Amino acid sequence: MKSKNNNIEEIAGQARNDSAKGTKRIISGSQILIESLICEGVDTIFGYPGGQIIPVFDTLYDFKNEINHILTRHEQGATHAAQGYARVSGKVGVCFVTSGPGATNVITGIGDAMLDSTPMVVIAGQVGANLLGTDAFQEIDVVGITQPITKWSYQIRRAEDISWAIARAFYIARSGRPGPVVLDFTKNAQAQNVEFEYQPCDFIRSYIPVPEVNPAQIEAAAQLIDEAKKPFALVGQGVILGNAEEELKAFLEKAGIPAGNTLLGLSALPSDYPLNKGFLGMHGNIGPNMKTNEADVIIAIGMRFDDRVTGDLTKYAKQAKIIHLDIDASEIGKNVPVDVAVLGDAKETLAALTEKVKKNSHTEWIRSFDEYDKLEYDKVIRKEIHPEHGQITMGEVVRRVSEATENKAVLVTDVGQNQMMASRYFKYSQPRSIVTSGGLGTMGFGIPAAMGAKIGAPERTVCLFCGDGGFQMTMQELGTIMQEQIGVKIIILNNHFLGMVRQWQELFFDERYSFTEMKNPDFVTIARAYGIASKEVNEREELDGAINDMLQDDKPYLLVVNVETKGLVYPMVPAGACITDILLCD
Amino acid sequence: MQESTLYTITIFSENTVGLLNQITIIFTRRGINIETLSVSPSAIKGIHKFTITVFSTKDMIEKVVQQIDKRVDILKAYYSTDDELVFQEIALYKIATNKLLALGSIEEIIRKYNIQILEMNETFMVLQKTGHYKETQGLFDELKDSVGVLQFIRSGRIAITKSKVERLSDMLASIEEKVTNEG
């Protein structure tokens, strides 16, 4: 990756001084954009140029030392890379794209970021303001298209509004429940010269990002928790977004509460943490799903009761009192009726709750998870990670890679069986260790997200697991990996099928494998074309050696593992079933 | 299933381009039809007020209103039922003058429905009636049957809560106060 000589502080400092002294420089809209981004601390942008954003890219040429622009091979890749970057670093991911098709190509990434609460600012070029509404070349209604899938979408038509819009965009994207913001930036505003002044935004009167903690709510929640015999915590991404991992541990330890994690909540607690009882939902662990319907008090923390977690809502945790801690008031009662709502930032609410609750241990209750752990190990896990014969399984590849990194790597997944296997069998030892498309379930997310994750956490090993299907949706990004020498470790779990759909066809559609079998190219040859080291593995005995080769340096690597063609992800709660109606392998 | 009733949603927002779309897409997602819609500047400078009526269940309306309230440019959204509101609609009726005159007594109908005449010439008259839906519709039905209605238009509902003040001004005041204290 490029080494950067950072003049960022200098530039941001000058902007501040100019504002203070009232000696404002007159510069172009494009330069205002770039300098405003620098004032917001942006040093990395993922993008793709085009006709209506050329002036911005022209200015960017003068800021090559301050801003590391990564040229992706498709705009969708830019957004997923920005997501990966944001998820591991906690910073706002930034994308530059052009108007028209450039903007429509980012829709998937924006939708993904919206559903997974990822802070992102997408700046899209737009035709000149005089052409708006005329069906001009590469004109499309970006604000109209993106309003349903953004926290805020705004069209900048005059250069005077640029620094205001940027400040507001970053404030909205990262504050409260984070999310994507789109700025639709007309070409005339890019070229226009006006005075530049930068004022960061920390207040919008119509927007309350973090509700104030209400002591009465804390009191009511603490009382329910103190009276509980079988309390159970459901941990979501809100804990990670709020940097509340330590507060969570303190709370669980004081009150003696076991916890389950949603997909996006994984890595908020280390895998081997004694009170971490595993993964919730459709392909989660048996224990946390069964215990959800046994607990007397459920404490949901920064999670949104997604249908992949709850299954049939009419049979979900009906016996339990539910306490819901969330930063977003509109999540309260959206899917599950709540007895006590605790609004606020998890870092604050958990700390306040810990102070109020009585010390407790619930030893018996915590121990009661063990029988399910044993059942799952015997019925599912042992066969998946220590198979004695047959083809390589997906689970064993994941576990061996995880262990080879001493469980310290960042896991990135694509979507489908690879995602569920990776989430289940990878082990987490520190927060922000999983990047996956949870809400939107975007196939093709993996490669670009892994690139972004590596750029956002260059000191960490980043391992991507993807299927042969998802890999081929965004494999053009191998070009980006080659150009920037982004040291991602890509593992294709190749079963020559769209595995998750095939699994549903096998289990619920009479084994009618309608359009799920794939004839694949030679992935190793493809990697070679991009100058990326690669190896294909068919036999179990070769696996460890190949993994070691992959991890021996910090260069990009593609490991193709031909796994069992008809592997199934278990346990499984079928869609719409009760979470205790769990399918296990025969 | 809960029963579907008519709810009135009141929304205070910044006056920005595309705001109406931000609101309507939330109804679209859940397949809710908007019955009436009325938008105008509110008593507070720079802030617009939307009054929207929809048929929905209590459970659904709560979620929808929270999702509207969450939007960055929305200051406040809340819902009310008819018993919590004083509300009104306005309707205009264009009638052929000769037909109305042929009825004989205009006075009777004007008194009965408390109608105003906005315009009258040799060919047509425009009558105005304010009231609840039932009342404006009642006049329409009567005119349609007796003299025929050439054109008819009814506004969206406007409404005022029976509580003492506009809740928004309190909210704004408390936000301003907090910002001043922190600043």
Image (cartoon, rainbow, N blue to C red):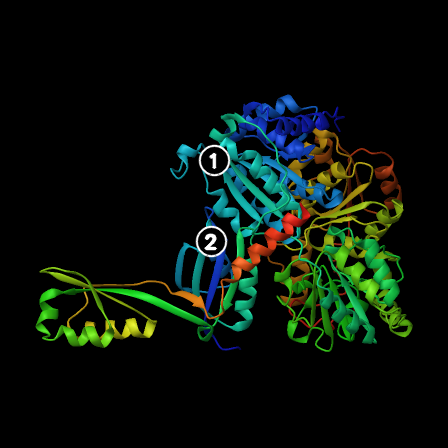
The quadrant of the rendering that contains the N terminus of chain A is top right
Q: Residue A155: x percent and y percent? A: 50, 40
Q: Residue at x 59, y 40 (%)?
A: A122
Q: Report the disc number at residue A157.
A: 1
Helix, strand or loop for disc 1: loop
Q: Residue at x 41, y 70 (%)?
A: B86
Q: Report the disc number at residue A213.
A: none
Q: Residue A148: x percent and y percent? A: 53, 52
Amino acid type indicated by mark 1: Arg
Q: Are marks 1 and 2 on the same chain?
A: no
Helix, strand or loop for disc 2: loop
Q: Is residue B94 visible?
A: yes
The quadrant of the rendering that contains the C terminus of chain A is bottom right
What chain does mark 1 sit on? A
Label 1 close to label 2 by CB (< 8 Å): no
In the picture shown, does residue B36 fall above or below A345?
below
The quarter of the picture where residue A342 lies is bottom right
What chain does mark 2 sit on? B
In the picture shown, does residue B9 fall above or below A70?
below
Tell me: A374 left or right of A169: right
Q: Residue at x 75, y 57 (%)?
A: A346
Q: Is residue A265 visible?
A: no
Q: Closer to the camera, A351 or B169?
A: B169
Q: CA distance from mark 1 to mark 2?
A: 27 Å
Q: Closer to the camera, A52 or A535?
A: A52
Q: Residue under circle 2?
A: B44
Amino acid type indicated by mark 2: Ile
